[in-house]
Image: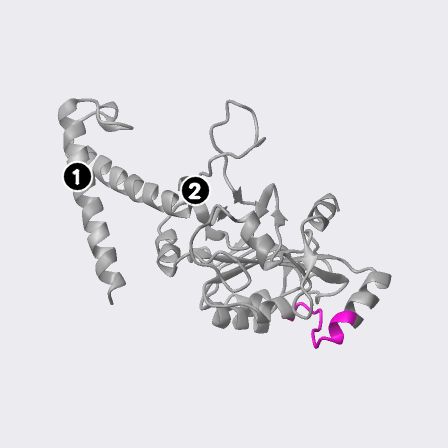
């Protein structure tokens, strides 16, 4: 409820279109560090090529620089990571642009008014409305406040629809999913708190494309949701390219390190975590430049196709 109260000062209704959501101007203001392309509602739109690159990440590579009042002065960084999920399809990596939906427990006096207002506009406040807004490359992040019973917000039919609408994006649910047997056959990454046979009920959609909470993480519309078998990291779009570039260097460093170990001539401390001699450092820097140049050329060629 504290989170909901905090959000109340940030969100506003958009007449005739959505439930509670940031206006385009507010979306741009709160994501102003992002200077790239945006969707019509102001949500950051990172390039598709970045999403493909993100699928090569590991969770250990997604370290976000701290902001104001983020923790003790001696903490240099923190992770936008939540690992407290049941991971469906751990063989798949997830990388997509976040769309958020925030639910709260149903309250009859409020629900009666909300339902009537939006029914007049042709909108039914069901669990399907946010799903129908999804686009290719999206990951639907649903804050169902950890509810289990009466929280089967998505079953196999809607799961299949999400897979088709997002072209394999993904789902993250702070709550429950149902129809596990059917869902298990559908190749869409998903991260959920629990599984339930019960249908969706007793909750109301209060926010769409507003900040939501996943564990100790604040998730913003337009973040990159990166998931693997460990859990999910939510990457601010303004930091994504630097994280991806650093990951390229990490992968090349690990490749070179193992290659030198394979030679059988060095102790681990000679090579890792940094080369210990001028000769080895020079060799590594040349190897790094060569590999980065190759990556850059390959991506440029792929972009022209």
Q: For the residue carrying disc 2, how many other residues have a C-alpha within 10 Å: few (<14), some (14-19), or many (20+)?
A: many
Give the residue at x 18% y 34%.
285
Q: Position of residue 187 (x, y in %)?
A: 46, 66
Q: State which region is magenta.
A: 117-128
The vertical placement of 47 against 293, above or below, is below
Q: Does the magenta stretch include residue 124?
A: yes
Q: For the residue carrying disc 1, how many other residues have a C-alpha within 10 Å: few (<14), some (14-19), or many (20+)?
A: some
Q: Position of residue 56 (x, y in %)?
A: 35, 51
Q: Is residue 150 visible?
A: no
Q: Which disc, if any, is residue 287? A: 1
Apparent side of residue 82 relative to residue 3 in the rendered image (left or right): left
- Which of the pair 109/284 is nearer the observer? 109
Number of numbered labels in the structure image: 2
Picture quarter with the C terminus: bottom left
Give the residue at x 55% y 62%.
41
Name the quadrant containing residue 203: bottom right
Q: Which residue, given by chain and number where applicable, does mark 2 sit on? A: 62
Apparent side of residue 147 relative to residue 135 in the rendered image (left or right): right
- Which of the pair 43/248 is nearer the observer? 43
The residues bearing labels 2 and 1 have C-alpha atoms spaced at a distance of 24 Å
């Amino acid at each position: 409820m504290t989170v909901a109260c905090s959000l109340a000062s940030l969100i506003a209704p958009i007449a005739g279109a959505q439930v509670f959501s940031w206006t385009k101007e507010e979306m741009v203001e709160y994501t102003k560090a992002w200077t790239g392309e945006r969707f019509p509602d102001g949500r950051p739109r990172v390039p598709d090529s970045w999403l493909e690159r993100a699928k090569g990440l590991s969770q250990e590579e997604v370290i976000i620089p701290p902001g104001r009042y983020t923790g003790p002065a001696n903490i240099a960084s923190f992770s936008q990571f939540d690992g407290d999920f049941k991971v469906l399809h751990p063989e798949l990596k997830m990388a997509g642009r976040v769309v958020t939906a925030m639910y709260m427990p149903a309250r009859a006096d409020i629900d009666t008014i909300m339902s009537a207002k939006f029914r007049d506009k042709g909108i039914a406040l069901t669990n399907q409305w946010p799903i129908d807004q999804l686009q290719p490359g999206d990951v639907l992040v649903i804050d169902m406040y950890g509810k289990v019973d009466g929280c089967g917000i998505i079953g196999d039919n809607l799961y299949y629809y999400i897979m088709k609408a997002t072209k394999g994006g993904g789902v993250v649910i702070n709550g429950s999913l149902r129809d596990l047997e059917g869902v298990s056959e559908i190749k869409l990454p998903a991260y959920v708190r629990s599984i339930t046979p019960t249908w969706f009920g007793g909750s109301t959609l209060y926010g769409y494309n507003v900040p939501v909470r996943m564990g100790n993480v604040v998730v913003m519309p337009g973040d990159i949701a990166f998931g693997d078998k460990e859990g999910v990291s939510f990457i601010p779009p303004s930091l994504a390219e630097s994280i991806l570039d650093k990951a390229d260097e990490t992968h090349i460093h690990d490749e070179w390190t193992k290659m030198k170990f394979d030679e059988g001539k060095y102790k681990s401390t000679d090579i890792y975590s940094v080369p210990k001699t001028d000769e080895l450092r020079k060799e590594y820097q040349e190897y790094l430049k060569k590999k980065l140049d190759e990556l850059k050329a390959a991506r440029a060629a792929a972009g022209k196709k």
